[in-house]
Amino acid sequence: MDYRESPSDEQKRYVAAVCPEYQSYLELATNGSSLENEITCDECIHWRNGRCGIFDEVLTSIDQT
């Protein structure tokens, strides 16, 4: 079984802020209108069932800067 610790809310906000692939499904639903919500991976179209294909890569690149 592949066990991975769930990322924290803080990690999801930080990754979303710098992720080159981040795209909010909320903005898509409102035709590009900027919403006042804080961005997070939870709102990204690539975030599926608590996972994203590049989350770890982006998080690791942040840690190395």
Image: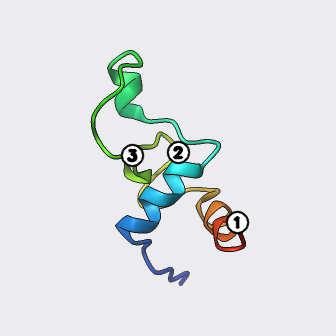
Name the secondary structure under disc 1: helix
Circle 2 residues within 10 Å: few <14, some 14–19, many ≥20? some
- Residue 59's place in the image compared with 45, above or below, is below
Which sits in the foreground, 14 or 55?
14
In the displayed orientation, state which residue is furthest to the top.
Answer: 31
Q: Earlier in the sequence, mark 1 or mark 3?
A: 3
- The residue identified by callout 1 is 61
Looking at the image, residue 53 sits to the left or right of residue 48; the answer is right
- The residue identified by callout 2 is 46
Name the secondary structure under disc 2: loop
Residue 54, located in which quarter of the rendered image? bottom right
Circle 3 residues within 10 Å: few <14, some 14–19, many ≥20? some
Disc 1 to disc 2: CB gap under 8 Å: no
Which sits in the foreground, 52 or 63?
63
The kind of residue tagged 2 is His
Q: Which of marks 1 and 2 is nearer the N terminus?
A: 2
The kind of residue tagged 1 is Ser
Give me the residue at 60% from left, 49% from top. 19
In the displayed orientation, state which residue is furthest to the left.
Answer: 36
Mark 3 vs mark 2, foreground winner is 3
The label number, if any, that marks residue 39 in the structure image: 3
Q: In which quarter of the image is the C terminus?
A: bottom right
Looking at the image, residue 58 sits to the left or right of residue 26; the answer is right
Q: How far apart are marks 1 and 3 (CA)?
A: 19 Å
Percent coordinates x, y for residue 4 in the rendering: 51, 80
